[in-house]
Image (tube, rainbow, N blue to C red):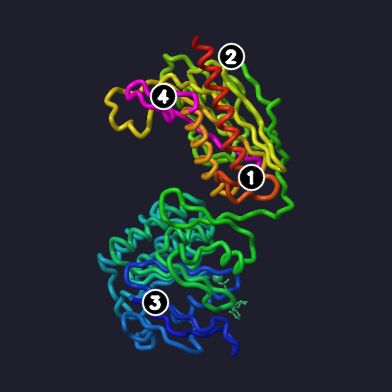
């Protein structure tokens, strides 16, 4: 659809844009990224024919851009510039209608049904139809931006060039505009080249990205090839981290504030755990980074309070979400800042121990309801519904873990728990083999994230050795307490 070949150009003899080449296929969105002043708008002006390139070629649908008349070009391509000085003191309707100019013939051409339809559709798609009699200057910046997008869409061209289309828009309107553009791309084969200020939006909505640095191409490719931590940090001169989007395979970034912005100090100690009849509680001095399979606030996040709640065997698990929030509020815990596990074991059977070596320290809490142990390797033979029985394990690390170390810590802790089951001869009552866990075990790894980062937590690392020994010994003791309580 669009081929840009070795384009250089700018405003004076010295080019702003230098030797840029790329292609965009029909029905694709290309996002242009780059810091302020890197030449994004200048590149778009060259592609749209506003600026003549000093070197190189623009080819649209196989024909050099110079071979199109102004009007032919306007039918092929609609442009939303970064700054719109024009068309003020027009009504919204009149402004959007200007988009139909390339479709008019001669001076006194009649306004066709098709023109009217295109204007109405564009106004509806951008949500500005209800202001159509309003004067443009009376609208907010975001509303004006939507009118200009409507004007470009009313043009019904095959190629849309946009310079920061979601500037001034709140997230609802960003989503509305970009979803709509994406829909035009997927359903009608529209091709879009758009400049983005926001790297995350660009990654989310674009098929391919072009990253400009001082007017030159630094990178071109799929979002996961362009949105790379070191590359973005280098080009934008800002510390960032990347993370996966929760629903789509599109990398996202987040800024990292200055290193001086220290968090509150936190250190986990056994003496700070509180055991009541209803729960085992630990509240840290500051939020800890957590990975867990808890009942409330599972997954990865930052949390300050941790509860292991003793519940009756008749607890209604179908109401667990609402009931947990109500319980937390009643006991003055913030539902958004607390991780909760449930156990049928009495809280007095909890075992809490700390382990340290060198400059590494962990605290482990276990409640071990092993009455309904399951041999996971034979679980496929079971036909009966499972019975409640739960081993809840908390591992607190006074230190900083990488993501990889968090995952390894979960494996290390699980292996240690299983070994305790073997030592304690916990038997799967149905298969009569040694159980490896129960049907509803939960595990939590929490770290203060202070000090030198520990990249790994496998069995032979310093922290892994503590976790292996700590979870094993604490689970052994917790199983013994459970057995004693039963007798
Ligand atoms: P971006 O859109 O990436 O922020 P621009 O393409 O607007 O960057 O600007 C790139 C460079 O070109 C900047 O150094 C800017 O000062 C210069 N520039 C932009 N517009 C003009 C102009 N009309 N005349 C002269 N220089 C300009
Ligand atoms: Mg710009």
Res. 87 in view: no
* Mark drawn on residue 373: 4
* Mark drawn on residue 271: none
> Which segment is the magenta one?
423-448
Q: How many marks?
A: 4
For marks 1 and 2 on the same chain, the one whose residue lies earlier in the sequence: 2
Q: Are marks 2 and 3 in contact (CB under 8 Å)?
A: no
Res. 355 in view: yes
Q: Helix, strand or loop at disc 4? A: loop
For marks 2 and 4 on the same chain, the one whose residue lies earlier in the sequence: 2
For marks 2 and 3 on the same chain, the one whose residue lies earlier in the sequence: 3
Question: Disc 1 marks which residue?
Answer: 462
Question: Disc 2 marks which residue?
Answer: 277
Question: Disc 3 marks which residue?
Answer: 23
> How many residues crowd mark 2 within 10 Å: few (<14), some (14–19), many (20+)?
few
Q: Answer above or below: position of 346 versus 45.
A: above
């Amino acid at each position: 659809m669009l081929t840009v070949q070795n384009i250089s150009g700018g405003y004076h003899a010295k080019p702003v844009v230098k030797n840029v080449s790329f292609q965009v296929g029909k029905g694709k969105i290309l996002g242009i990224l780059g810091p302020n002043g890197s030449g994004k708008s200048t590149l778009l002006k060259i592609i749209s024919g506003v600026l003549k390139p000093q070197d190189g070629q623009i080819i649209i649908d196989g024909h050099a851009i110079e071979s199109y008349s102004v009007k032919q070009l306007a039918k092929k391509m609609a442009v939303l510039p970064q700054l719109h000085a024009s068309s003020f003191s027009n009504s919204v309707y009149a402004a959007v209608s200007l988009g139909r100019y390339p479709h008019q013939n001669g001076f006194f051409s009649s306004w066709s049904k098709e023109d009217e339809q295109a204007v109405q559709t564009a106004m509806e798609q951008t949500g500005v139809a209800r202001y159509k009699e309003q004067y443009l200057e009376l609208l907010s910046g975001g509303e004006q931006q939507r009118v200009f997008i409507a004007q470009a869409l009313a043009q019904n061209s095959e190629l849309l060039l946009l310079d920061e289309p979601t500037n001034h828009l709140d997230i609802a309107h960003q989503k509305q505009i970009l979803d709509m553009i994406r829909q035009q791309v997927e359903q009608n084969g529209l091709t879009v080249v758009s400049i983005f200020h926001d790297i995350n939006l660009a990654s989310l909505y674009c098929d391919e990205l072009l990253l400009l640095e001082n007017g030159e191409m630094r990178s071109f490719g799929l979002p996961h090839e362009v949105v790379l931590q070191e590359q973005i940090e280098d080009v934008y001169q800002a510390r960032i981290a990347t993370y996966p989007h929760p629903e789509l395979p599109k990398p996202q970034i987040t800024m990292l504030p200055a290193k001086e912005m220290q968090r509150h100090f936190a250190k986990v100690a056994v003496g700070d755990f509180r055991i009541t009849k209803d729960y085992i509680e630990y509240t840290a001095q500051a939020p800890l980074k957590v990975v867990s399979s808890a009942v409330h606030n599972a997954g990865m996040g930052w949390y300050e309070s941790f509860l292991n709640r003793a519940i009756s065997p008749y607890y209604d698990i179908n109401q667990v979400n609402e009931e947990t929030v109500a319980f937390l509020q009643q006991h003055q815990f913030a539902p958004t800042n607390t991780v909760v596990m449930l156990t049928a074991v009495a809280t007095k059977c909890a075992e809490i121990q700390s382990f340290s070596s060198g400059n590494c320290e962990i605290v482990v809490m276990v409640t071990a309801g092993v009455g309904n142990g399951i041999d996971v390797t034979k679980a496929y033979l079971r036909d009966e519904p499972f019975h409640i029985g739960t081993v809840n394990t908390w591992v607190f690390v006074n230190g900083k873990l990488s993501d990889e170390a968090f995952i390894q810590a979960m494996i290390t802790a699980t292996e240690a728990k299983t070994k305790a089951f073997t030592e304690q001869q916990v038997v799967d009552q149905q298969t009569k083999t040694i159980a490896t866990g129960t049907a509803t075990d939960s595990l939590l790894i929490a770290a203060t994230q202070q000090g030198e980062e520990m990249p790994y937590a496998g069995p032979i690392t310093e922290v892994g050795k503590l976790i292996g020994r700590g979870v094993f010994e604490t689970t052994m003791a917790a199983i013994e307490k459970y057995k004693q309580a039963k007798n």
